[in-house]
Amino acid sequence: MSLRSDKVAGAITCVFGIVMIGFASFFLLVMTLQRHLILGMPSLRQSAKGDSVIEAMHAIHGVWFTYLPLTIVGGICFALAGFQIHRGSRPARRVAQATAIGGYIWIIAYAISCYRILDVIGAAVGAFPESANEGFRWLTLAGTAIFAAFPTSLLYLLSRPQSDTATTSVEPTEPV
């Protein structure tokens, strides 16, 4: 059986891009609905605790409304490049690799933005002790760092030479 690496790399890159587009689009829709729900809750605005919850939601939405459209743009780049890589395009490989490197920049900027709003979220939650807030902070940063596995795996996949074949041979066995 023979698999050309440009076919496999193209398919994986294209699927990854489509998943990114779907993920970001879904969460943009959810955030838009959340924002409209919050605006429709006058009782939440009347309490002191409600003001901090609204402020935390606006901080989270501010970060996500900034970074999720960038995720959609990256997903479109991956999907289109993946389709062209599948057809054997060398420039499309470079576009996908550049987009994966841009993914590292996205991850770093997103982590910094999330770290900055954690105090606002902690004030809204308020019931947690300081050690729990600190644990949540590190858990959030560790979760964001895990995203680095995706551009790393794509860079590895796209670093293989174009048209490299993976062959598996099955040796005929003699009857016993």
Image (cartoon, grey):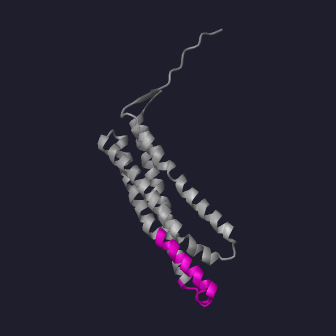
Query: In this orientation, which residue lies closer to the viewer: 19 or 133?
Result: 133
| Magenta highlight range | 39-63
16, above or below 133, in the image: above
Residue 162 screen position, x and y as percent? 36, 34
In the rendered image, which quarter contains the C terminus?
top right
Q: Residue at x 36, y 32 (%)?
A: 163
Please tell me whether the stretch drawn in magenta is mainly helix, strand or loop: helix
State the residue lying farthest toward the left. 91
116, above or below 71, in the image: below
Q: Residue at x 44, y 40 (%)?
A: 157
In this rendering, position of residue 55 left or right of residue 88 = right
Query: In this orientation, which residue lies closer to the viewer: 118 or 162?
Result: 118
- Give yes or no for residue 62 being in the magenta stretch: yes
- Give yes or no for residue 163 being in the magenta stretch: no
Query: In this orientation, which residue lies closer to the viewer: 151 or 88?
Result: 151
143, above or below 153, in the image: below
Residue 78 screen position, x and y as percent? 39, 51
Query: In this orientation, which residue lies closer to the viewer: 131 or 151?
Result: 131
Q: Residue at x 63, y 84 (%)?
A: 49
In this rendering, position of residue 50 left or right of residue 71 = right
Residue 89 screen position, x and y as percent? 31, 41
**Residue 138's quadrant in the figure?**
bottom right
State how many labels appear.
0
Residue 141 screen position, x and y as percent? 56, 59
Q: Residue at x 34, y 40 (%)?
A: 87
52, above or below 171, in the image: below
